[in-house]
Amino acid sequence: MAWLRGIAVVIGLIALWQAVVSVTGVPEFILPPPLDVAHALVADASLLAGHAVITIAEILIGFACGGLLGVATALAMAAWRPARDWLLPVIVASQAIPVFALAPILVLWLGFDLWPKIAMATLIIYFPVASAFFDGLRRTDPGYLDLARTMGAGRGTVLRRIRLPSALPALASGLRVGVAVAPIGAVVGEWIGASAGLGHLMLHAKARTDTPRMFAALILLAVIGVVLYLAADRVLRRAVSWHAESNPADD
Amino acid sequence: MRVKNGAAAPPIPAFTVPPLGIRVHAAGFDFGGAPLFEALDFELAAGSWTCLLGPSGVGKTTLLRLIAGLVDPWPGSAIACSDGGALAGRIAYMAQQDLLLPWLSALDNVLLGARLRRQPVDGAAGERARWLLARVGLAEKLASLPAALSGGQRQRVALARTLFEARPLVLMDEPFAALDAITRHQLQALAAELLHGATVLHVTHDPWEALRLADRLYVMAGAPARLGDPVVLPGAPPRDVSGAGLATRHAELLSLLADGRREAA
């Protein structure tokens, strides 16, 4: 059912798009009709695929780095008081910095290849993962902690056996946000300076007023984002299947 | 291991720890300057079940947590064990919430203490956990997650986990309060049977529950709270609460509790 609804929404949006083009008679270089974009998708398939692979690699590597760093930071802050006292204000303050403003500097430092985009994606994923996971780690039900204390558990064991697993649903929400924003980081990085990737392809096509190709790249980005999100959501749900509230009616 | 043939009954005691008596001396605690209770002296006789009755907010739970070592008492408070040893590491704790970890099966929840102490959980320990779950009537539910169990079943797992700890002092904070009447009745009987021989301190606000289970009960009332004289109940728990003598006792307890509330107000 959800599948059919999704397809219906996509068809509806394409119909609306076509209707806007037909009714307003907007020129092709502003808003190309869906069929032209479909044509661009097919005609430029291998070109688009090549750039898409780059962008996907940036997103996935960035997601892995940002996720791991975020998890490690949250664990360090939960396990070791000084880490928390020093890192927490830094993390809170750094959330206020617009990460995108760092993009030109990252390009300056890391060059035009994959690394500045991976750094961008890493940064943008790091904060939601670290803060969501740390929040989960410090919101352990105090009853569990009391019980563990009467059982004679050490701090490290409590962290590993109780606080960490009970924070997994929070980590899953952080990772969901992360996977949703990761493509933004990669594409913004590509806009600032790149020699490959879908963001780069879009700018390149814009310079040549090849609007259908811009739209083709955009659609590909949207599909990549949705597929990554759905895949991550599926894995995460399975990983915390005991957490009933997050999936009341799974399958 | 004796537990291996446990399923074959006649009942092997679920609780086999040597009894331990506790003497609490001058226990005091304050919340933000106002003493919640002070100078409480009482004794938990070895192997006996003591109920602590009192209106909500009087400090019963705090007193229990103080004995459990979960809050720091006033200086001068002292807890002595009948064998002269320290109390730390010799209590098991059972709360109103079952406190089962939702990601662990019933069996793994019973084994939690062993895991947290980095003790082996296979072999004898696993065998004993299975046997205890069978004793609380959940032999078929070893692999079930807490979410798949009813409230009564979850509290049964919590009881099995408490028994698995095999600690001489069992502290219970309204463990049956969240259950429906029939389930509560069944669990009271089960707990009385399986915890036979343990020294139990059981906090409750239900006079019937106290009359059914306790060897001895205290009423805690007032601000700062004091303990009344111990009420010693005859006969072995779990008692039949329809017995004529207990109805009179119940009325007495209710009036004691009502006095305590008036005093506190």
Image (cartoon, coloured by chain):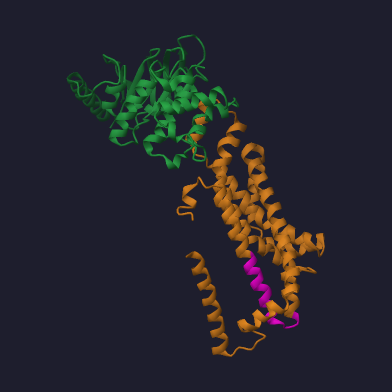
Chain colours: A orange, B green
Task: List x then y, in percent, for residue A251.
Answer: 49, 56
Most foreground residue, A130 or A230: A230
Quarter where residue B247 is shown? top left
**Residue shown at 56% from the left, 41% from the top:** A165
State whether residue A27 is above or below residue B140: below
Q: Give left or right: position of B247 versus A232.
A: left
Q: Measuring 64% from the left and 41% from the top, which residue is drawn there?
A: A75
* Residue B243 horizontal/vertical position (percent): 19, 21
Residue A132 seen from this side: yes
Question: Horizontally, is A95 left or right of A251 in the view?
Answer: right
**Residue bounds of the magenta highlight:** A207-224
Q: Quadrant of residue B178?
A: top left
From the top left corner, tell me how far across and down residue B237 is, in percent. Answer: 30, 19
Magenta stretch, main secondary structure, is helix
- The structure residue drawn at horizontal position 50% and vertical position 32%, both measured from the top left corner, is B107
Q: Nearer the viewer, residue A176 or B11?
A: B11
Instruction: Give whichever of B122, A138 is nearer the camera.
Output: B122
When the figure is inspected, residue A233 is found, relative to residue B183, above or below; the finding is: below
Quarter residue A80 falls in: top right
Image quarter (top left, top right, bottom left or bottom right) of the C terminus of chain B? top left
**Is residue B31 shown to the viewer in this render?**
no
Q: Position of residue A241 (x, y in %)?
A: 52, 47
Position of A233 with respect to A124 (left or right) is left
As for residue A223 lying within the magenta part, the answer is yes
